[in-house]
Structures are given as C-alpha cells and as structure tokens.
Image (tube, helix red, strand yellow):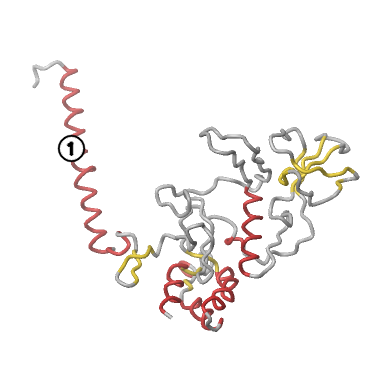
Amino acid sequence: MERLPSWIRQHLAAVRAVIVLTVILGGIYPLAVTGVAQAVFNDQANGSPVESGGKTVGSAIVGQLFTDKDGNPVRKYFQSRPSAAGDGYDMLSTAASNLGPEDVVDTLPVPGAKDDQGDPDEGRQSLLTQVCARSKAIGELDGVSGARPYCTADGVGAVLKVFPAVGPPTRAVSVNQACPARPFVATYEGVTVECGKPGEDYAAGRTVPVRGTAGPPAVPADAVTASGSGLDPHISLAYAELQAPRVAKERGIDVAKVNELIKEHTAGRPLGFMGEPAVNVLELNLALDKG
C-alpha cells in the first residue's frame, strides 16, 4: 500500500470511509432506532392506528375527512378542519397552503379557457375567499351565521381594486365577484362599483379590502383554516360544540349526551400550558357510532 501513489491511497481511504459510514449510518443506526421504537413505543412507531370492529379505521395522530363520495359532509359526523395536504390529509403531500393574510385577490376562471394541463380553467381562490366560502358553508351546515368581516354575502373576499392607485378614484371593481354578479357595495367614494371581468388584469389598481358590518364570527378560526401540516386530527372545543346540535339531531339523540362525549374526548393543553384543549375527531365519531 505504501508503494501506491498518494492519489490512489487517498481514493482507497475515501472508499473505506464510505463503506464504514454506510454500514453504521445506513444499517446499524436505523435498525437500532427501529428496534427501540418497536420495543418501547410500538403504537406510536406504527402510526398510532385506531381500530373499530377489528379493522384499522384511521390514526389517532392523522386527521381524515368525513364526507360522501361527492365530497359533501356526512351530517351525522363531526367534521374535521380543512386540510391543504393534497386532496385532504394526504400523508405524502403534508403541507400548508403557504398563503398569507395579504392573499385577498382571486384569479377568476375564464369561461372556455384551458389551463396548462388542458383542463378547464378553474381560476384560483385567494386565502380570504377560501375562508369566506368555508365559513358560509359551515354556517349553512350547522344553522349559524357564516358571516365574517371582509367577506361578501355570497362567500368571497370583499375586496375592491380602485383606479388610479393614487389619488381620487375614477373606477372601482369588486374583483372577486365575477360578472354578472351584483357587487357587494354599490359605490365607493362616489364611484359606481363594477363586477369583475374574468381575464382582465387589475394589477395596477389599489387593493382595498372592505370590512363590512359583520360582528365577531360564529364559526371558529380552525373551522376555516388548514393546519401547518394539513394532518391535524383535532378541532377546537368551540368548533366541536358548534357541531353538536346538528350531530345530535341527525342521530336522534340528546345534545347533552353529545356534549358529554365531546368532554370525554377533549385533550388538555400539552404540558399543561401549551396551546388550547382540542377534540380528536375520529375518536369522537367512533364513540358516537358505538352509542
């Protein structure tokens, strides 16, 4: 070995290091970690499965949808919070929407147009319109007001584009309400408000969100926003209590019994002080099915 050129010795040392590190970090370490996990934290290591009737029906740490084949909420079940992970609670696409509070302007779909994949153009809903639409739908589902500040009555963001961007307005457009919809306000500073025209570029205008007259929303925030992971299995106590009358009515049971089950499946604050109490939706629905 000493007679070999130095560059060959260096390459052989590198190869030996790769082999040793691969065995340790690619074999011994993963096996050791897996063994400890299976021995000490078996349930958690296998995904915290939840079983019912001898079958695995979900996970205690991953949320799921309680909808029919058309995506409509099954009324006898408590509904989970929205999910931005794939088509909903997709563990291979765990993510948030990455949309922030300033995302308030929709891209209206252009009738007859196609997107880059050749599918019909569906436009793009802003975060504000997503929140407004969800709040309206939940209000209708649970028999409460779905009204929220900065939302129109038809469930989109109450946002104007005002022209020019600086100075007295000469034109105002309700950009999230496609023509021929009637704008949520008739005038803005003396200028008649127009409906939005799909395909028209309003980027040069000044964005003006309009708060409206809605008071504090009846629909909780977690009911209309997705979690950071998109996999949260819990909802707030407020959202669970909002749904209780509807679930009780659909199942023909006393709402007091439903509220008692909510309390039984409410987890306290982690470590006693972090976050807020939360309700595991899957476990609560299974408890309801068991009667």
Vertical position of residue 94 compared to residue 253: above or below: above
Q: Picture coordinates of residue 269 (x, y %)? A: 49, 69
Q: Picture coordinates of residue 246 (x, y %)? A: 58, 74
Q: Residue at x 58, y 56 (%)?
A: 225
Most foreground residue, 152 or 120: 120
Q: Residue at x 60, y 58 (%)?
A: 224
Q: Where the C terminus falls, by quadrant?
A: bottom left
Left or right of residue 184, residue 112 in this image: left
Q: Residues within 10 Å of mark 1 (few under 14, many from 20)?
A: few
Q: Which residue is mark 1?
A: 20
Vertical position of residue 236 compared to residue 261: above or below: above
Q: Residue at x 86, y 47 (%)?
A: 187
Q: For residue 167, what is the image quadrant? A: top right
Residue furthest to the right:
190
Q: Where the N terminus falls, by quadrant?
A: top left
Most foreground residue, 102 or 175: 175
Q: Picture coordinates of residue 134 (x, y %)? A: 62, 57
Most foreground residue, 240 or 42: 240
Vertical position of residue 33 compared to residue 264: above or below: above
Most foreground residue, 69 or 155: 69
| Count of numbered badges drawn on the protein | 1
Identify the element where label 1 is drawn. helix
**What's the residue type where badge 1 is placed?**
Val
Q: For residue 162, what is the image quadrant? A: top right
Q: Picture coordinates of residue 168 (x, y %)? A: 88, 38
